[in-house]
Amino acid sequence: IQALALLNNKFIEHYAGRFEERLTRESPDNVAAQLQRAYLLAFARTPSDEEVKFGEAFIAEHGLAQYCVVIFNVNEFVYVD
């Protein structure tokens, strides 16, 4: 239930939009740089090659804002070890 709540939550959508704005401002017109920055900000690490491929394909189909929603729903972001 938590995953569905996070995917359909106005709060998450709002802050995903704000995250998208930051990524676009810091790396305009450069999807690869936006992905690198998103991972550094959200997870304090760089993305793997597989994560970059997935991210580029996802952003091409659904947009950066929806990718930011995905980032906010990844277990690595939601839970602290």
Image: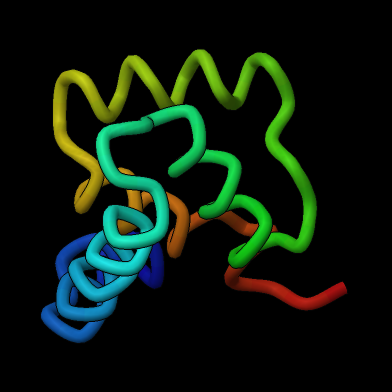
Residue for point 62% across, 51% down: 39
Q: Is residue 18 left or right of residue 36?
A: left
- Display colour scheme: rainbow
Looking at the image, how many numbered discs can be counted on the residues? 0
Q: Is residue 42 left or right of residue 7?
A: right
Residue 18 x %, y %: 24, 75
Residue for point 20% across, 85% down: 11
From this view, report whether residue 1 is shown above or below residue 54: below
- Quarter holding the N terminus is bottom left
Residue for point 37% across, 31% down: 31
User: Residue 48 falls in which quadrant of the image?
Assistant: top right
Residue 41 x %, y %: 61, 66
Query: Residue lying farthest bottom?
Result: 11
Query: Residue lying farthest right?
Result: 81
From this view, report whether residue 29 is shown above or below residue 68: above
Residue 44 x %, y %: 76, 62
Q: Is residue 48 left or right of residue 22?
A: right
- Quarter holding the C terminus is bottom right
Residue 25 x %, y %: 29, 61
From this view, report whether residue 3 is shown above or below residue 30: below
Residue for point 15% across, 31% down: 62
